[in-house]
Structures are given as C-alpha cells and as structure tokens.
Image (cartoon, rainbow, N blue to C red):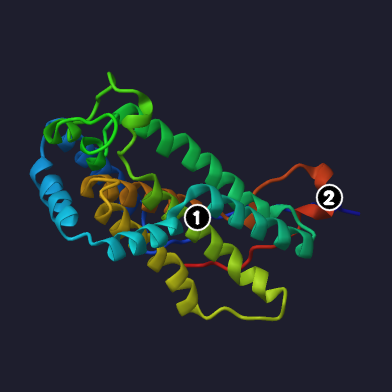
Amino acid sequence: MRETQAVRRKAQLRTVRPAGWWWDALLLAALVGLTAALAADRLFGVDRAVADWAEAHRPTAAYWLAVVFNYLGQGTPLTLIALGMGVLLAVRARSVRPVLPPAVAFVLTYLTIGPLKVWTARPAPSASVKEPFLSPDATLPLFQHDLPVRFAQSYPSGHVANAIVWYGVIALLLTPLLAGFGRSVPPRLVTVVRLVPPVVVLCTTTYLGWHWLTDSVAGLLLGLLLDRLLHRVPWDGVPLPARLGDLRRPALPTPVR
C-alpha cells in the first residue's frame, strides 16, 4: 500500500498594480536620483519657491487647519491603530497572521525612514525662523552632520511615507475585519483610505513649512516602494512555526489590489 504524501504548495507573491517589478525599480531609481540631485545642490530653487509661497499664503485659520489634518500622518498613532486592528482580527480569526502586516510594516519603516533622515541630515524650511536659526540658504543642503540630529531630519518626509505605508496596512486589514462582523467594504472606500490621507499629509506638511517639497516627494517615493513590497507578501502563505498549530490558519485571504 503506497503512502500518500501531502505536497505543500509554495506560496506565491500577490500581484500589485501596476504589475511588475520594474515599477519598484523605477520608484527606487527616482528616489536615488532625487537624493543625488539634492546632494549636488540641484532643485533648491523649486524648494525655495514653494516654501516662500506657502509662507506668504498661510493665514492663521489655514495654518491650524493644516496642522489638524497633518495628524493623519503621525506614525505612532497609525502604528497603534493598525496593530489594534491586527490583534482584534487575530482574536476573532484565532490566527496570528493578522498581526504580521503591522509587525513587518513597523520593521520596514523603522529600518528605512529614520536611518535615511539621519544619513541625509537636512534641516527643514522652518530652521531659519526657529532653532537652530540658520540663514535661509543654509537650510537647503543635505549632509549637514555638524548640526544636532534633531535639527536635521527633514529628508525624506516621515509623515508622508508613514501615511502611505500605514493606511495601506489598515486597508489590508479592514476588509477581513469587517467581514468577521458580517459587513462588506466597498472597493471605493478602500481606495479612499489608501489615497486621501497620504495626499492630505503631503500637501499639509509642505504647506506648513515642516518639510521641503522634495522631502515630501522623497517620502512619497519611499512610501510607495514599501507599500508595494508589503502588498506582495502572501500573508496566509508565510511559513510559521509548527508549534503554533491552528493559530497558523489563514485569515487574510482578500487581496486589496
């Protein structure tokens, strides 16, 4: 009598849109190219023009409105919200898989955004009107490692990158979480969750003078790259230790893209 051996199917990467790794390569090349241009003292005129326009068109009411909406990109609250959704879904599905996306997203953002900020050492536009009170021209260049770290962490914009990554994770968890309560999520709502907050954060963080325009663009490029990597992962097919038993059961079957 021949024994039947269970064949374990290899997990395949999820498809993202636009499809193809060349989009990831394009995003990375654009980020590297933008950084190289700024390191060569290019694009400063664009940054200065946008910052000067924003400063000249920033009444008190608009300032505070932008401050409020900019909270949509706060990394710590977004991390806690995504983790809370993951834990809630994990409890309802009796699976550890829903906590994997927030955990991996935290590691990716921690290992990329912060180190890039420290390495590039660029002050924000506001560094000319508050500590360390640099001259306007001195706020533009990268690699100002003679400044204390807290005054030179503008590039890339962490708010923009965090908004893209974390709202992507929230959207990924939202559909299966609400499905467990018998609710369906319209695809348009998922699109709104993924698109609107990053756009709002990019505009407000630049308008407030907390980041140069190129800082925000760099955050956009980095965030999109990390988001594509996270959404390629087949979370229900990720190998987990056998000792977890039934806690390895699938819980994230619905692709977001």
State the residue position of label 1. Answer: 166
Q: Position of residue 86 (x, y in %)?
A: 66, 57
Residue at 80% x, 60% y is 94
All told, the count of numbered labels is: 2
**Three-letter code for the amino acid on which mark 2 is drawn:** Gly
Asked whether residue 14 is in view, the answer is: no
Q: Position of residue 141 (x, y in %)?
A: 18, 31
As drawn, the label of residue 110 is none
First in sequence: mark 2 or mark 1? 1
CB contact under 8 Å: marks 2 and 1: no
Q: Nearer the viewer, residue 110 or 244?
A: 110
Q: Is residue 43 left or right of residue 151?
A: left
Q: Is residue 94 left or right of residue 42?
A: right
User: In the picture shown, does residue 125 fall above or below 208?
Assistant: above
Secondary element type, mark 2 = helix
State the residue position of label 2. Answer: 245
Q: Residue furthest top?
A: 146
Q: Nearer the viewer, residue 211 or 43?
A: 211
Dividing the image into 4 quarters, which one contains the N terminus? bottom right
Residue at 34% x, 34% y is 153
Q: CA distance from mark 2 to mark 1?
A: 29 Å
Residue at 45% x, 79% y is 188
Q: Choose top left, top right, bottom left or bottom right for residue 133.
A: top left
